[in-house]
Image (spheres, rainbow, N blue to C red):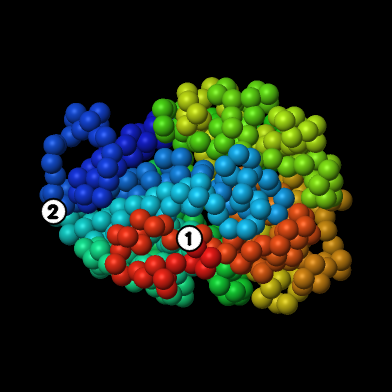
Amino acid sequence: MKSLSKTYHNRLVRTSICTLAILSGGLLVSCEDVLKEQPRSVAVETFFNTAAEVETAVNGIFSPLRNNNYSVYETTLECQSDFTNGRGSWAPLHGFQGLDDANITRVAGLWNAFYLSIRNANLVIQNAPLGKSISAADVNRYVAEAKFMRAFNYFQLVRNWSGVPLRTEANMSETNLPKSAPEDVYNLIVADLLAAEGNLPDNPSVAGRPTRWAAKTMLADVYLTLGKFAEARDKAGEVIQSGKFALVPIATRTDFQQKVWGPDLVSTSEEIFYLKYTRQLNQGNYMLWVSNHPDTKLFNFGGAYVLYLDVTSNYYTSWDAADVRKALWDKINFGLGANTLVSAKFTDQQAVSQSGAGNDDPVYGYSDVLLLYAEAASRAGNGPTAAGLEALNMVRRRAYGKPSAEASTTDLKLTDFNADTFLNRVLTERSYEFQLGGKRWLDLKRTGKAAEAVLAATGKTVAQKHYLWPIPVSEMNYNKGLDPAKDQNPGY
């Protein structure tokens, strides 16, 4: 079973989201159950005084993401990849012609979730230092966690919407904010992560809390996105050199399902930053409902089988059958023909609801660090390096059921690659490794390969409007600092 600390963490999350609703006035939720043992009203100046109170507020930063929203976010991105099709209302995303009304509404909900999480982070950053009964060390740690999460949210916003309003602890009372340039958003992201890196602990205080290694990993990801390849290489290298992480050995598909992403795991040697879930009503992972099909018998609540592959696609046929990750797709004919594949990555046969699976969401794991390093080292040096190739081979060895730290017959050779072919190899490896993680479309965009990859895989031309999501109409109506005629993303 999941640890008691994880259950306690989730209980704090439920309490904190209601407390923050009262503090900020920014949430419309029903808090009756958790407020039975809580004060009926609370003021900021009397709440952020103790470590326990601030910890509760920090938990509230995670709530908007964990409440199904991050799974919906990852699914939306998966449906925009070159090889993963979307079903039902998600299908237009794979047309690459921009978002239709259903998906415009869907991403508006994601915008709101990211900004609500940012709002809750700003409350901690602003008020924790004013507490009268909390140590300086605790203040620094909680503020660092809040800055990590604020950076995390802005990283999602800027990659999908480009320039966005920058809401921080300094302008929380301002309603009307103009759109900031993407470089200003990235400047805040980097500043927040550097501050977090300097004040977060080596090990999480509670399961799921960020550490300095999580900050370094996200910095590597951000630097890679910005084209700062040497900086990305060095940050990922610091995580590798720490010796704190290792890939979990596997031999079979079941090993991946149970030992790497299993519903009963508290943590693993490769976890760096995961969104934590547990088998409680509305406290579990929603991705299992999104991705599974009832016929797989992997999830006891069936599934919506939103995402699917085609067994005849070049992507699937070119995938080596000896790679165990390929076995994480099951052939299921749900009306689109016998060649349809649905994901078998996540399984939980003891979930308590559609949103009640125990599997954590592996946002950043050690394989991410290794592949970030492999790409960044090559791009910094204008060609693959021996250390970068070793990092790539470590991920491949594990995927083939081999010890990740020992040379293998599956190893790729440095002489087989130049700078461009090695980048393509890393991107392919990332697509295999991070199934359902929503990373492929963002990888294609940041490397400038989206149009080429989509055309090759689907024969479709990506419309310019498809590269960015529309700013929600509600934001345009509410925020008078935005001009709908000038500030909306192209095509909307």
Residue count near mark 1 (Cα–Cα under 10 Å), binned few <14, some 14–19, many ≥20: many
Mark 1 to mark 2 CA distance (whole Å): 37 Å
Identified at 67% across, 34% down, the residue is 344
Closer to us: 404 or 290: 290
Q: Secondary structure at mark 2?
A: helix
1 vs 2, front mark: 1
Residue count near mark 2 (Cα–Cα under 10 Å), binned few <14, some 14–19, many ≥20: few
Closer to us: 466 or 65: 466
Q: Dividing the picture into quarters, in which one does residue 212 lie?
A: bottom left
Q: Dividing the picture into quarters, in which one does residue 235 lie?
A: bottom right
Identified at 64% across, 64% down, the residue is 463
Identified at 59% across, 61% down, the residue is 466
Tag 1 residue: 470
Which residue type carries mark 2? Glu
Q: Dividing the picture into quarters, in which one does residue 449 lie?
A: bottom right
Q: Secondary structure at mark 1?
A: loop
